[in-house]
Amino acid sequence: MTTSDEFTAISEPQTQAMRADLEEQLQWRELQLRDLRAAVDGGNDDTARLALLADVAATERAVAELRKALERIEEGSYGRCADCAAIIPFGRLKIRPLARYCIACQRRHEAR
């Protein structure tokens, strides 16, 4: 990460690259979710079924988070903190593309 990425807002070309990456991740997760659901439907071992159901739930959460990030891109709010509207630097978004909060607000959420 360059020093400028640590503090600068995301540019339009960077946003489009992030969108493409998020869409690719969403497509992969949706396929994974389909396969997991099929495995749950076809399984008879209760222990394995419970583990698969946990995987389904985790994958559903991942799909929801990816969709929310893509919605923020569409709305033009991607890269802005959901709490204080501060810019989330591109450097942070490269590391955590689903980030909804600036670092200060994220710390407050984690402290709760």
Image: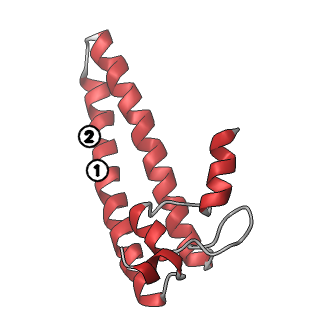
Seen at 25% across and 24% down, the residue is: 42
Q: Is residue 81 visible?
A: yes
Tell me the SS state at disc 2. helix
Name the side, left or right, on which 46 lies relative to 93.
left
Is the image coloured rainbow, by chain, by secondary structure, or in one colour?
secondary structure
Above or below: residue 10 compared with residue 80: below
Mark 2 belongs to which amino acid? Asp
Q: Quadrant of the C terminus?
A: top right
The CA distance from mark 2 to mark 1 is 6 Å
Q: Position of residue 9 (x, y in %)?
A: 54, 82
Q: Which quadrant of the figure has residue 53?
A: top left
Q: Position of residue 50 (x, y in %)?
A: 37, 18
* Observer-nearest of 99 and 63: 99
Q: Is residue 15 visible?
A: no
Seen at 68% across and 57% down, the residue is: 105
Q: Position of residue 56 (x, y in %)?
A: 39, 34
User: Hey, which residue is sitting farthest front in the picture?
Assistant: 3
Above or below: residue 89 compared with residue 46: below
Seen at 48% across and 44% down, the residue is: 61
Q: Which quadrant of the figure has residue 87?
A: bottom right
User: Hey, which residue is sitting farthest bottom in the picture?
Assistant: 12
Label pair 2/1, CB-CB below 8 angstroms: yes
Q: Residues within 10 Å of mark 1 (few under 14, many from 20)?
A: few
Q: Quadrant of the N terminus?
A: bottom left
Q: Which residue is mark 2?
A: 35
User: Hey, which residue is sitting farthest top in the picture?
Assistant: 46
Above or below: residue 13 compared with residue 47: below
* Observer-nearest of 38 and 36: 36
- Numbered mark located on residue 31 in the image: 1
Q: Position of residue 17 (x, y in %)?
A: 36, 79
Tell me the SS state at disc 1. helix
Seen at 53% across and 60% down, the residue is: 99
